[in-house]
Amino acid sequence: MIKAPFLYISSSSQSSASEFSLHKALFRSYILDRRLLMMRGAIGTLPIPAEARHRSSGSVDDSNKRRSHKGKDFKDAEKALHTSVQDRSSNCKFLSLKLVLVIIVCGTFLTLLLSPTSYQNEQIFSSSSGSRFVDIGWIWERAVGADPRYVSDSVINWTKIKHIVQTLVKGKQQNLKIGLLNFNGSEINGWRQLAQGAKSVVVYLDFANTSLTWEALYPEWIDEEEESEVPVCPSLPDPQVPNGYQFDLVAVKLPCHRQRSENWSRDIARLHLQLAAAKISASTRGNHPVHVLFVTDCFPIPNLFTCKELVVHEGNTWLYKPSLRSMREKLKLPVGSCELSVPLATKGRPYLGTAHREAYATILHSAHFYVCGAIAAAQSIRQSGSMRDLVILVDETISEYHRGGLETAGWKIRTIQRIRNPKAEKDAYNEWNYSKFRLWQLTDYDKIIFIDADLLILRNIDFLFGMPEISATGNNATLFNSGVMVIEPSNCTFKLLMDHINEIESYNGGDQGYLNEIFTWWHRIPKHMNFLKHFWIGDEEEKKVQKTRLFGADPPILYVLHYLGNKPWVCFRDFDCNWNVDILQEFASDVAHARWWRVHDKMPENLQKFCLLRSKQKAQLEWDRRQAEKAKYPDEHWKRNITDPRLKTCIDEFCFWESMLWHWGETNWTDNGTVPSVPAVSSVGQKKTTTASLAGL
């Protein structure tokens, strides 16, 4: 590792024999460091073998080699400073000349060290700075051996930084101790002159392996069950903090390649430097207050350094006062999604937490379609034993009638204004799905477990409240699935999300893609905590059997079962209607379907009525059945008789759904109706108890 030499020297030093010895030692150190620097420039880009999660110590042979080289360098330096006895005997006539040369070299070196540095912006810095840090800046410039991944072109606002440092110095009885990371030599000299009472120290950090990729830290798949291997994350070098040193301020300059790459937030060097800053601050003993300052043109990782901890933000200067307790907990987790942050196999998951500050939450907007699903989800949470609050965000399109059903099921209603996705087309499925960002405005809670309204909680997952933001299951590529995720509400995080909606592109045009661009540092939880009802095209028969067993296991093995495709409540209870649609058959499972209906059947009857079928839905089911019959799908679900009592229960003014098939598919056909305050329910052939219609269920 390259270390730029730094010295602590009093400006009032007087010449003496002991000081001359010190200067000789410094000169020897300078020569050694200079040679090591040149060696790093030569070998800095060579590939390094992938490391295990914890760094292994160097071998004895390597250590001996380093000692041998070091001893040789010191001997070479000694030759430049001392004349051997034998040479003085044979060449005494050159003795005086050599001695004079040595004194001149040492004197010149000392003069360079103590000479003030000139700056164009002298008006910013006080020449009488009390900083005790002396740095040979030109040795540490990026030109030799620098890794371009770590180079930052951000322009430092010295005026702002000086004001921050002076503010932190006030009231301190001892010198303000500043740790500097990823600044070049001239910038370090700039820090040296900022304010009186500051003491700066360079913190060294080895570069990450050049072969390390973001995909290695965030793989699409890991062997969670450890059937063939135990997942292990690559390691990132730790910062080298002087033993027993406690910093008051950690300053870091971060690269931001937004101009060069659309993937700027998935940057190894950028992640490495922020984790290093977190480790430096967390290494402080006890609760000694530490501030972290970033110089960067891109926002720092919002769930590592949270905006609730943001003290100052001006331009590219970001000052945080992180919670050390929270930071230490985060740093215990794997560096990426390459390992599980929550173990899959465990006998118990004790977690107490602060129940009144934690809640499950979901959101409904633009349609009543998911009301039944949300009611079933609430029932499943209570059946799992959880007593946390249930909060549901709804917009003005959700009727009072349906809100009443949600409240009866246990949801606390919060009315919101929808947020439009500016990149969505009008009336598209994703036009209003950025409304999910409103979850971050639930600031009367510290933690939220968001759940989609189309899933069931089969086992208690309250322990996930102990996980940080964002904890979720993996999706495709390096991304997480937002169907179940832990978030930490904060108005400033909400503002961050809103500030970039016109700038950041979502990979799928929806909220999940957008959130993955903001929160690139996330923590993998087992897929059993958001298990998708889905059979992949490449699944072998054995894999399909295994999934089916998981769907139906009693007592349950899965924690959460997520229903994709046609939802159970829009099918007849007799079988999964995904079987009758060619492109949806990968989501079909009669076993998972029956599991949802078992939860439904435990609901009170006054809640089951929110899952009744409209006439148009019945017509759609019959249309799909006829298409499956024409195609003669081999599963033959199209042959099954329907016994679901909802088939003969009507909640619309127009109950003859069979006649709808005459016009099915016509673009000008509609069945829009009004929403009543009391449900309209009747059996076919009987007089209705009320004439109002129930549209939109």
Image (spheres, rainbow, N blue to C red):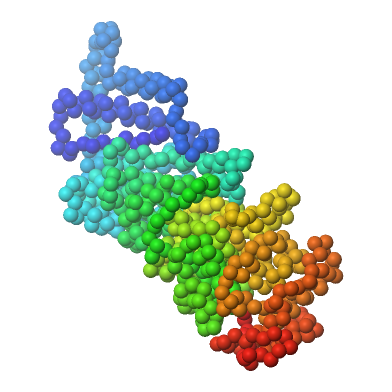
355 sits to left or right of 178? right
Residue 69 point in image, percent of width and height: 40, 22
Residue 48 point in image, percent of width and height: 52, 35
The residue shown at (28%, 44%) is 285
The residue shown at (18%, 47%) is 174
The residue shown at (57%, 87%) is 678
Please say if 495 is above or below 551.
below
Pick the front one: 216 or 672: 672
The residue shown at (41%, 50%) is 330
Residue 204 point in image, percent of width and height: 37, 40
Picture quarter with the N terminus: top left
Whether residue 479 appears in this view of the structure is no
Pick the front one: 560 or 55: 560
Residue 284 point in image, percent of width and height: 30, 45
Whether residue 92 appears in this view of the structure is yes
Q: How many marks?
A: 0
Picture quarter with the C terminus: bottom right
307 sits to left or right of 684? left
Pick the front one: 444 or 152: 444
